[in-house]
Amino acid sequence: MERKNIFWLCVVFFVFFNSSYQRGFSQSSQSISELESICEKNEKEGNWLELSKCQTKIGFLYRDQQNYQKSIEWMRKAIISNEKVGNLNGIKNLYANIGLMYSELNNYDEAIECFQKSLKINEQQNKKSDILSDLINIAQAQQNKHNYQQSNSTLERAVGYAQEMNDKNSLKIIYGMFSENYDKLGKYDKAKEYFELSSSLRSQLQKEEIKKYEEITKKAEAEINLKDKEKQDLSEKLEKVKYEKEINLKLWQQEKELNELKQKEFENKERLQKAKQRTTNIIVALLAVIIVIISIFIAVVFKQLKQIKQVNHQLEESFKQIAAQKEEIEQQRDIANNQKKKITDSIAYAQRIQNAVLPPTYAFDKILPEYFILFKPRDMVSGDFYWVSSKDGVAIVAAADCTGHGVPGAFMSMLGIAFLNDIINKMTFNRHILTLSASEILNQLRELVINSLHQTGQPYETKDGMDIALCIIDFENKQMQFAGAHNPAYVIRKNELIILEGDRMPIGIYKNSTQSFTNHEFKLELNDQIYLFSDGYYDQIGGPHKTKMLSGNFKNFLLQISNRPISEQKILLEENFEKWKGDFEQIDDVLIFGFKFVPQRISTGIESEYLWENVNILIAEDVDINYFLLVEALRPTGAIIHRAHNGVEAVKFCKDNSVDLVLMDIRMPEMDGLEATQEIRKFNKTLPIIAQTAHADVTDLVKINEVGCNDYISKPVNLKTFLSVIKKHLNK
Amino acid sequence: MESLNIPATDITPGIRFNASTGVLEIEGNSLPEDVIGFYKDIFQWVQNYIEHPNSTTTINIRLNYFNSSSSKVLLDILSILEGLTDQNVKVEVNWFYLELDDDMLQTGKEFESLVKIPFKFVNYMDNK
């Protein structure tokens, strides 16, 4: 419908613009046959211009009869005639008309060709309005041919001309055609946009038309008033105009309704397209997901099939490997167990050495009639140690706590014991015991520790050392000296606690290592109870809230139990400790050394029972540590010690010197103990020879007996057994 | 610089060293078997910290128990932080000790005498 409308509008439009030229022919009243004879006449005379006019007239007559074929035939003849005289205006108009007829005949290709010929001439003459008509006609033909894209590009050109000339009518037509084209191309939004442009132009034009009519009406009315004579005609004219106005109004209203309908249609189409698009999108997405899932599934299945083979293979390999690893792990476990056993054995041995070095109970028994030692190392060996010595009615006791615990602590404690022995021996040598000073002992001990550990006080270097509490008790004068490195001494006298504070510096390197320790002098009263200890007891974490016991609680507990017998105190302290500790692990070594000052003159320890001054003892021992242990064990007896490093040396020494007893190690280089004993027996049948052996079994013992040893001791030595065995043989 | 956070165990202290606030907190017990092993990372952190210290540095020590080897390490850490005073960093130690724990107070006093960092002693009640 719309397309046809536009087509006829174009025709009308074209006719309108070429009216002057056409009028001459269309209004002719001559018949075709008359005109044909005029044509023949003009042809003969070579009167080409007249011929062309005549031929054109015939063409138009046929056209009016809608005999387009004949019309075209005649117009083509007219073109030929016009060409002879170069009448370009005539030619282009003829082409345009032929084009229109071809369009009517649906022969769009021919139509376009004709329009283009017309266009070419118009372009040469730069007749813009004619160019515009040609372009619109071409676009129309292209549209009819369904060449919407081409039609659009032709229209693009036409728009330029129409805008240049502000030709709203043409613009309206062009926009309408754009809208049609886009509609066909499925670009509904564009189609809608152009349709709206076209509609608005149309309504604008119609409004203008109405206005124009209104003006005419006014003019006519004025004329009615002015010219009564013409009133009749004019009133008719008025009627006519009014009528036309009404028609136009109706038309306008119809157009408007139509436009609205059209607009709705576009919107629906758009909505439908969007919905379609959405559905398509969903379907595409679903398909994509399904394809991906299937691909993954296939990939996984393929991979697994491949892997199953591999895995089977790998499993076999793994089983082999696991078997191998198991074997290896078992081997390593055995190695680890062995090593652990070795280390444990080694530490157990060290424990026995440490026990041997710690003062034997008899040493205390002689010095302190009433005492207890609560000694609970955290590990097998201890960083805490106690020490006792006596001379000329004076007892020296100490409780110390070395840095660390376990093996490292034990190393320090061995050093401490050895140094203390050394210091006391040097101090008492050629000097009266009463010149001893507790603080001086600590000063010297500190110096020895610093020197032996090569401490220089550099930052980050080892600050190992020990805390210690040391007392010298003069029983005769009821006087006690005390010096402490960090550690105090507690004295309980009649339910009252007296604290002798130690200095706040350690035995070891310290920022002020040259400052002397303080020597406290304290007058003892009978039944005073003195306690020396390390911090391990009251620092133990435990109790309901896993906190430290704290020294305050320790003091209170000591006061609570201080009127109980001293041996019972040890048990109570131990119970209290275990109760506090509960499930928590012991965090440090624990040492409490307590004794009562009772009226008993003290003898100098070992001397009565094991005093062997001027007795010569030969120790045949190749291993230094074992030798020094024995020396240390024998030191309190005052015996004179000699050493042989092997059997040969032992035999030679016994031959050349007076010896009272031999401690013979069995395993020695060059000549072992058994052979050496046999050799000695060759020249000395009575000399007591005591074999010392580790891990002795029955066959060993038989051998020892066979070669002539008097007795044997097991290594590591138990000090008390050791001394009693020696005593037995010396007394014989 | 990242903060250092190590949760406390029965035998190792809780560490909360915050570089952006300059608050370094140690609390709990310190008696690890391998002291050097435990404090190695802490040392490293402190070494890095003194390169980019906060303008004020507060060290809160709230220890219940520490063994003698930990004591050495603590002193070493404080010695490193002591160097900050030369960089015009305000450094202080808050030494917390449990009510009645005179030993911990004494130890704190001893630490105070060994480093050039001002100490504040704060007595606190056990909340447990």
Image (cartoon, grey):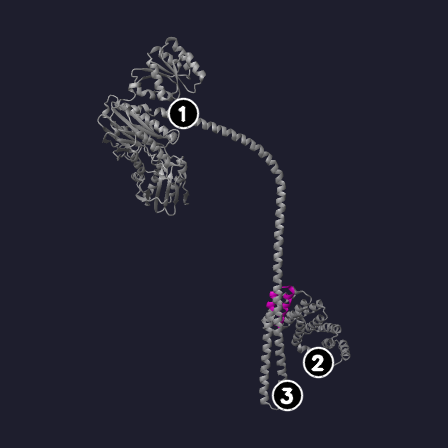
Residue A231 is left or right of residue B60, and the answer is: right
**Location of mark 3 (residue):** A233
On the image, the x and y values in percent for residue A192 come to 60, 67
Using the image, tell me which numbered label, if any, was put on residue A57: none
Q: Tell which circle, 1 or 2, labels the residue nearer the N-terminal end.
A: 2
**Location of mark 1 (residue):** A349
Foreground mark, 1 or 2, reads 1
**Location of mark 2 (residue):** A27
CA distance separating discs 2 and 3: 26 Å
What amino acid is at disc 2?
Gln
Residue A125 in view here: no
Residue A535 or residue B70, whichever sits in front: A535
- Quadrant in which the N terminus of chain A appears: bottom right
Q: Residue at x 69, y 66 (%)?
A: A145
Q: Predominant secondary structure in magenta?
A: helix
Q: Are marks 1 and 2 in contact (CB under 8 Å)?
A: no
CA distance separating discs 1 and 2: 148 Å
